[in-house]
Amino acid sequence: MSMMKAIQVLAKGEPMKLVKIPVPQPGEGQVLLRVEACGVCYGDSKVIEGATSEYPRIPGHEVVGIVEKLGTGSTKWKIGQRVGIGWHGGNGNTTALTIDGGYAEYMVAFENALIVIPEEISAEEAAPLLCAGETSFSALRNSKARPGDLVAISGIGGLGHLAVQYAKKAGFQTVAISRGSEKEKLVRELGANYYIDSEKEDPAKVLKELGGAKVILATAPNAKVISSLINGLGTDGELIIAAVSDEPLELSPMDFLSGPNTVRGTFTDIKEMEAAIQFSVLTDVRPMIEVFPLECAKEAYEKMMAAKTHFRAVLSMSK
Ligand SMILES: NC(=O)c1ccc[n+]([C@@H]2O[C@H](COP(=O)([O-])OP(=O)(O)OC[C@H]3O[C@@H](n4cnc5c(N)ncnc54)[C@H](OP(=O)(O)O)[C@@H]3O)[C@@H](O)[C@H]2O)c1
Ligand SMILES: [Zn+2]
């Protein structure tokens, strides 16, 4: 039996662990991927917090790999093709929650959950686009913002640094909001026109002084921070929440009086994922990545959770 290295969470609340387990076999409508790279997303914390259907579970939902083997009845892909998979696991599954993910040398995926990864982009750079990229891209392209509008991104991590680039490429006046001044230089290089240090200034007040934002994309996973942003909207503005937090938002009816403001979430699907990859290739949007070998997944995850990664950690199986 062929064996593979993988990172597993053995039970709710337990740290991830490097294990050697049999290579999984693709069933009907599935393919076996030889994983090339997998991004480390804040969403991976859900696996440790106990949101998965069963344990042990392999995290990782930003996966690029090569089709290695076809299950019975799988006709969509050819062996050797390079493909990617995000949260949408296919057939009602969520990658890394109801099926194992890509912190492993091999992964089984439903064929209808996969998209082509163009050759212009490396596996390590494509991986973060499959969740961080698609989420921020889709939020902005389906927003009220039009070229020239003021658009703010709160939280500069995996999602946020891509959102800054997408906003800039879409022709928005782009504002980055981050705690401290450490990320200013990098974020300006990515295209931010304005930088707000939320430890020194109230982001909502600064946004109002700039005329009020048409759209604010909240990626910082903190309900208090998200709630405070609504006051930075201009007339008929939109606060879009990509960040996940279990805490309730604190909004007052007064917050909605400056125009028909809206607060909403984002929803993505496989078509948005394809569009995010295509737009990124077309406009040269790339994630800034720190590459780690699979063995260092725990270190990569902890660095991401401490918001110390610039800006997306990626596990590379060839490192
Ligand atoms: N809706 C979706 O489909 C979807 C998809 C992917 C991810 N998500 C969610 O989006 C959020 C961001 O994911 P990510 O992978 O970009 O995470 P990340 O790389 O850790 O970035 C999040 C950023 O938010 C800021 N931040 C973190 N903790 C904070 C806190 N307690 N208070 C204020 N700011 C904080 C930090 O930015 P600064 O250092 O710049 O302040 C951090 O870099 C997560 O909640 C994730 O679960 C949602
Ligand atoms: Zn994610």
Image (tube, rainbow, N blue to C red):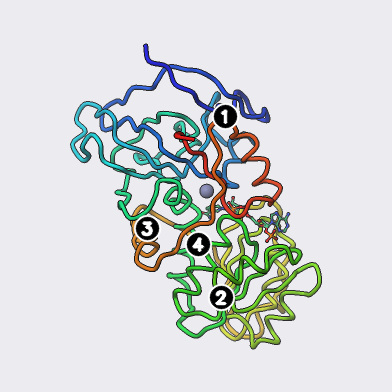
Is tag 1's residue or tag 4's residue first in the polypeptide sequence? 4
Q: Could you give the CA–CA distance between mark 4 and mark 2, rounded to whole angstroms?
A: 12 Å
Q: Residue at x 53, y 32 (%)?
A: 294
Q: Residues within 10 Å of mark 2 (few under 14, many from 20)?
A: many
Horizontal side, residue 310 vs residue 86: left or right: right
| Tag in front: 3 or 2 | 3
In the image, residue 84 above or below residue 236: above
Q: Residue at x 37, y 11 (%)?
A: 1
The CB of the residue at mark 1 lies under 8 Å from ligand 1: no
Seen from the viewer's position, the closer of residues 297 and 219 is 297
What secondary structure is found at the residue carrying circle 1?
helix
Residue 44, position in %: x, y?
Answer: 57, 41
Horizontal side, residue 259 vs residue 100: left or right: right
Q: Could you give the CA–CA distance between mark 4 and mark 3, rounded to whole angstroms?
A: 12 Å
Q: Residue 70 got which mark?
A: none
Seen from the viewer's position, the closer of residues 269 and 86 is 86
Seen from the viewer's position, the closer of residues 40 and 244 is 40
Q: Residue 295 got which mark?
A: 1
- Residue at image mark 4: 136
Contact between marks 1 and 4 (CB within 8 A): the answer is no
Q: Could you give the CA–CA distance between mark 1 and mark 3, rounded to whole angstroms?
A: 28 Å
Contact between marks 4 and 2 (CB within 8 A): the answer is no
